[in-house]
Amino acid sequence: MKISLGALAGRWNRSETFAFYDAVALSSVDVVYIGAALHGPLGGLQQRDCLAVARELASGGKEVVLSVRAGAEVRDTEDSHAWIEDCGLPVEVGDARTFRLLAGKVPLVLGAAMPCVSGVELRRMVELGARRWVLPAVCKGEVVQALACAGDARCEIELPVLSPRRFARWQCRVEVCGYEGWPLHAMPGCDLDASPDDTAPDWASDLDELQRAGVSILRVTPRDAGDVGLSQTLCEWLRGDIDAQAAYAEYAASPERSRARVSGALHPWQRCLFQRIYAGVR
């Protein structure tokens, strides 16, 4: 099992983005997605910035994936994606048009927004070059449904975790869900408003179940610099440096229960760097 950091979510300026990836370089995260737009900057970074950050992280042993988002004005032209083909990195795509542009040219990751509603369709995309599928699911019922759809498709399965939507009961996308009341902060949890927010989940059992179902990567979606600490905690848990209860305690003690502090297993100078970055965005 690996831990990944998805492309940045929300608004980030250029200095915040570089500071974040400096911290990521010191972490134990296995896979890093760097947001890139076919046209224009994303997260304050231009194309050359994305590639510079990617090269630095890759030189440190991390798997780097460009997470491409096509803008509304992108046209199906060669110059709109030639630079992505030339960079030699795997690419995460989130729409059918970008998938069509890059299929067969670079290794592809199917993002959570990529339309994929059946096992037959998933297998077809795998044949066209997709090697990984990010599940379009957040809550327990959706994940079970999506894994059933994956079937025998020969690709890695990546699951975004600890990102509850807090949807109302009637907004759940699973018509008949048998997981109502599942702990909100489980992996995955139940994001219904009726879920008992204070129920401590059993992360150890959750992890065993996900591994048996074929999930090989857990994704943290970074919304601020503190998410490097959360991903580091998960890495230490998977390595066996801390147990599931200790990992959850770190997570639960952080602000809004969605940011974990950097574990004491890091060197003091690393902790100091993370704490300065974390404090700078508060």
Image: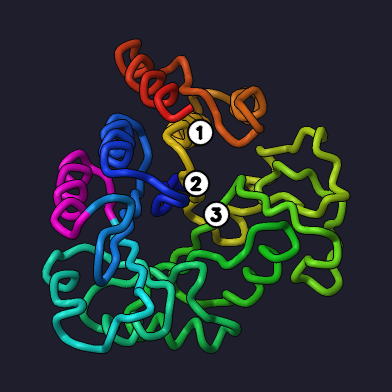
Tell me the amino acid under the disc marked 1.
Leu
Question: What is the three-letter code of the residue carrying label 3?
Answer: Pro
Dot 3 or dot 2: first in sequence order is: 3
Whole-number angstrom distance, CA of label 1 to CA of label 3: 13 Å
**Who's the residue at 44% across and 88% down the image?**
124
Q: Which residues are magenta?
A: 46-64
Residue 174, percent from left and from top:
78, 71
**Residue position marked by numbered label 1 in the rendering:** 230
Q: CA distance from mark 2 to mark 1?
A: 8 Å
- Residue found farthest to the top: 268
- Marks 3 and 2, how far apart in space? 6 Å
- Identify the element where label 2 is drawn: strand
Identify the residue under disc 3: 160
What numbered label is drawn on residue 220?
Answer: 2
Mark 1 Cα-neighbour bin, 10 Å: few <14, some 14–19, many ≥20: many
12 part of magenta stretch? no
Q: Residue at x 45, y 68 (%)?
A: 111
Q: Assess whether mark 1 and mark 2 are in contact (beta carbons under 8 angstroms).
A: yes
Q: Earlier in the sequence, mark 2 or mark 1?
A: 2
Res. 49 mark:
none
- Which residue lies at the image location 52% right of the left edge and 80% below the top edge? 115
Q: Secondary structure at mark 3?
A: strand
Q: Position of residue 179 (x, y in %)?
A: 83, 57
Looking at the image, tell me whether mark 1 or mark 3 is earlier in sequence order.
Answer: 3
What residue do we see at 20% from left, 79% from top? 80
Q: Position of residue 56 (x, y in %)?
A: 16, 43
